[in-house]
Amino acid sequence: MSVLEIDGLRTFIRQRTGVVRAVDGVSFAIEPGETVGLVGESGCGKTMTGLSIMGLLPSRGFIADGAIRFGGRDLATLNEPAMRKVRGNEIGIVFQDPMTSLNPTMTIGHQIAEVVSEHRGVSKDDAMARAEEVLALVGMPRPAERLGYYPHQLSGGLRQRVMIGIALACEPKLLIADEPTTALDVTIQDQILALLDELKDRLGMAVLLITHDMGVIAGRADRVLVMYAGKVVERAATGQLFHRTRHPYTAALLASIPRLDQPVTQQLYTIPGLPPDLAHPPAGCRFAPRCRFATKECDGSEPPLGGPDPAHPYACFHPIGPDSALARAEVTERHGGRDGSATSGDLLVLDHIVKEFAVTRGALLRRAAGTVKAVSDVTLTIRRGETLGLVGESGCGKTTIGRMIVALERPTSGRVLFEGQEIGRLAGTRLRQVRKDLQIMFQDPYASLDPRMRVGSILREPLQIQGFGSAAEQRAHVADLLREVGLSPRSTELYPHEFSGGQRQRIGLARALALSPKLIVADEPVSALDVSIRSQILNLMRRLQAAHRLTYVMISHDLSVIRYLADQVGVMYLGKLVEVGSSADVYERPAHPYTLGLLNTIPVPDPEVERAKRGIAVVGELPSAMEPPSGCRFRTRCPLAQDVCAAEEPPLRSFSGEHKAACHFPLQTVSEVPAP
Amino acid sequence: MIGYIIRRIGQAVIVIAGVTIIVFILRHLLPGSIARAIIGLRATPQQVATFNRVNGLDRSLPLQYVTFLNQLLHGNLGYSFKQNMSVDAIVVHDLPNDLLLVGASLVLALLIAIPVGIVQAVRRNKLVDYAATGISFVLYSMPAYLLGLLLIAFFAVNLRVLPAEAPQQPTIGGVLSDPAGLVLPVATLTLITVALFSRYMRSSAIDSLTQDYIRTARAKGLRQSAILYRHLLRNSLIPVATLVGISMPGILTFGLIVEQLFNFPGIGLAYFNAAVDGDYPVVFGVTVLVAAVTVLGNLIADVAYALLDPRVRYD
C-alpha cells in the first residue's frame, strides 16, 4: 500500500498572459520508507507538485484535475479544515531557504512547539519538552539552551535543522524536502542530507526529495522521476536511470554537468535553447525543439510515458539505446597554459595580502567590537592566459580576494601587483587606466544589471567612460560583443528583464569583455543558473579565453566547475589559503584534509560513486572569522587534528613543484622543507 | 536592551540640544530686538537698556545661551509678559489635556488601523479592500479642519447628539468630566491618523504575507487566525512602529488644528493664540517642549521597534 499515490495531477496557475500549465498530467506513487527523487530544472513543475500535495499553492494556482491519494483520502479535493490536520502532522515539508523560512520574531522553541500543540493538543510545557526532544533528534548541539534562540542567532545549517525539526515534530508519514540543501555550503549540505537519511530510517517515513542537483539525487534517492516542462519524462530506479538512461533530456542533463572524472579537454555538452513557455506549450513532445533526436513525429504528437519495462517508463519516440551513449561534443583545443608555449610570465601577483573589516557596535558612539579577518596572508601568482580557481565555503574570503584584484577593495596590508604595478596604491587617472584591464563578472544575473538601462547603454557605458572611439564605433563594438556572446545585435534595444537568466549572464560577460581586459574575475558566474544553461556559459567562457588570451580568476564554491576551467586551484578556508596547486595536483592528490573533505562532500551524479563514499568528511560548522581558531584554522573540524594544530600555525609546504598545502599532517609526502 | 535605550536617550539629548540652539538663535533674529518684541515698540531706550540688564541680554551670546539652557534644565521655559504668567504654568496647565487628546487618538487609531490593514491585506483586491482603501484616501486627502467641520455639521448641528465644542473647563479633571465634548475632537484626529496608519499596515502586511515563514506557518497546519496573530502581526508591526514615531510631529500639528477648531483648552490652542498675539516667550517655550515630545515619541517608537524585532536588540 503506497503512502502517496498521485494520478494525473494537473496544477495550473492563472497569469495575465494566460493559464500556465505548471504541472500537466503527473502520476507517481511513493512506497513506505522510500526516498523518491523529483529532479528537473527551474520551472519544470517539481516545486508545484510538492505544493499541490500540501495544498499550499500560491493564490493564483489551483488543481485543475487529478487525484492525490494519501491515507485513504484525496488531498486534491479535501476541504481546508481537514487539510490542516494533514499539514505538519501527516506530511511535513522542508523548504529551500532556511534564512527566510523561519519566523524572525519567534524563538525556535516556540516555532517547533507550535506545531506540536496544534496537532497533539498537549500542554504548552509538554509541547516545549517535545521541541527540545526534536532539536536533539535533528542534531542541534545543546538543545535545551537553543530553545530560546531566535533564527538570526543560528547559522544556515542549524536553521535548516530547525526547519527539519518543525517538519518532523509530529512524526509524519511523508516528508517533502524541496531543495533542502540548495542554499547551504557543500560541507553543510552533506551533513543535512545524511541527517535526512538517518531520520527517514529512524522514523520509518517516506521522503519526496525535490532537487535540481543530479548529484544529490544519485546519493540519496531510491527511485527518480525526471520532470521537464510540467511532465514526467522518465522514471526509474536510481541506478537504472543513471546507467541505462533512455530519455534524451535526462541524458543531456547528465552530460551537461561538469564532472570531476571527465577529461577537461572536452567541451561540456549543451542543450540548445530554453524550456518552453508553459502558457502555450508546443503541441508534440515538449522537449522536441531542443532535442537532437527529434523528428517530425515528435512535433506532431506527444509521446506517452511508457516503454517495454514497466519499472522504467520514458516519454520518447526515439529513446537512447542501452549502447548508444549521447554523442559527446567535439574535443576542443585547450588554450595555452600548462604547455608553456602561450604563457609569457606572471600577470598578477598577490603578495601576502591581508584584508580585515572592522566591526563596530553602538549607534551613537561607534566603537570597534573586533575585526573580521576576511583574508589572512595570501600569496598567489597568476600567469598570463591561465585560469586560477578559488574554492571554499562561504565566508572563506574568496570573494574579497576577487574584489581586491579588481581594485574594488584595498588590502589592509600586502600588495596586489598587476603587471608589476601595485594597484592597491593607485588612484585617480592611473587607477582608471588599470581598471580597463581588470573586469569582473558577478553571480546574480538579475541584480547586477541596471533594470532601467537598455542593454545597448549597459554595454556602451564602459566604452564611454574610457573614451573608446566615436559613437558609431562604440555601437559597432557593442554589436560585435553581442554576437560574440551569442546574442542578437538587436538586443541593444531591450531591457535586462526581457532576457532569461542565462542570457543575462551572457550580457554580464559581454560587459566584462567590452574594454578588452587582460583579466576577468568571475565571481560564481554560473551558480544562479540551471544546469543546461550553466554548461553553455562555461563553454562560452572557455572559447572566449582562447580567442582573447584572457586570464580568469574563477571564484566558486563548486569544485567541479572550477576543475572544468582552472589550471591552478587555490583552496581557501576562513581567510587562509590552505592548499594551492595545479588542477591535477589538488583534485587527484589533495594534501590538505579540508580539500579532501570538500572533494568527498560534492555530490557526484553517479549512484555507485555517491554510495561508496567514505573517508574524510567535513564535520561541524564554520567558526567565526572574528575569532578564528588558534594555530591551524581548520583544526576544529579536522579529523586528523592533534595538539600541535592548536599551538602552531602550519606553514605552506611544497609537495611537488607548485603544489603546496598548509597542514601539519598532510595526506601527501612533503618533498622539501619550507623556505625560511 | 538597556544599553540600546541609553544610547537612544543620548541621541535624543543631542537632538533637543540642537533645537534649543535654533530657538535661541531665532529669539535673537526677532525683528527689532527681544526687548522691543516683549515690552513694545514705544519703550524708551532707557527702558530697553534696563530690560536687557535685568534679563541678562547685555551679556555675550554664548553666556546668554548657557543661561537659557540652565533655565530650561531647571524647567524654566520663560515668562509671558502678555499673560503675566510663566510659560511653565501655561504648559503644566494645558499639557495633560493634550496628552489626553493626542494619546487617546493615537491609541484608537492604532486599534482601528492594525486590524483594518490586516483584513485588507488578507482580502487584497476584494470588495472590503477597495472600500477601506477608498475611505482612507478620502480621509487622508481631506484637510483636518474640513473633516472636523463636517463632523460638527452632522453630529452637532443636524443630529444634535454631540456638542460642537470641546469641554471648556480648562483643567484635566474638568475635561474628563465632560466626555461627550471629547468625542468629536478625538474622532477628527483619529480618523486622519487611521487613514495613514492603515495604508501602511496594509502594505506591510501584504509584504509579510508573501514571506516564506508565512508559508512555513501554513505548512504547519495552523488555523488562519493563528497564522495572522502569531506570525503576521508582529512582523507587520515592525515598519509601522517606525512610522508612528516619524509621524509624531504631523499628529501634533493636526492636534493644533483640531484644538483651534473645537476651542480645546490645550497647548496647541495656547501656541496658536500666542503666535497670533506675538507672545514670543510662549511660542519659544512650547517649541522646545514640542521638540522634546517629538523626540520622546520617536524614542518610544524605536524601543517598540527593538521589542518587536529581536534582530535589533543586540546591535
Image: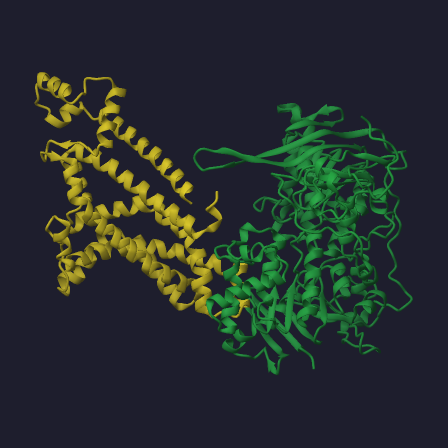
Chain colours: A green, B yellow
Tell me, yes or no, if residue A596 can be seen here: yes
Residue B64 against residue A221 in the figure, above or below: above
**Residue A514 in view of the camera:** no
Quarter of the image containing the N terminus of chain B?
top left
Residue A46: % across, % down:
67, 66
Residue placed most toward the observer, A77 or A593: A593
Which residue is at 12% across, 53% downward? Answer: B174
Q: Nearer the viewer, residue A629 or A234?
A: A629
Q: Is residue B201 left or right of residue A620?
A: left
In the image, farthest residue toward the front: A643
**B89 with respect to A369 (left or right):** left
Give the quarter of the image for residue B107: bottom left
Q: Position of residue A365 (x, y in %)?
A: 44, 33
Q: Nearer the viewer, residue A208 or B137?
A: A208
The relative height of residue A566 versus residue A208 in the rendered view (above or below) is above
Left or right, B183 with reference to A597: left
Q: Is residue A47 left or right of residue A105?
A: right
Query: Total number of numbered labels?
Result: 0
Percent of width and height locating residue A612:
82, 60
Rendering quarter of residue A421: top right
Which residue shows up at 64% across the image and 24% down it?
Answer: A429
When the figure is inspected, residue B156 is found, relative to residue A448, above or below; the finding is: below
- The picture places residue B188, in percent across and down from the top left corner, at 24, 55
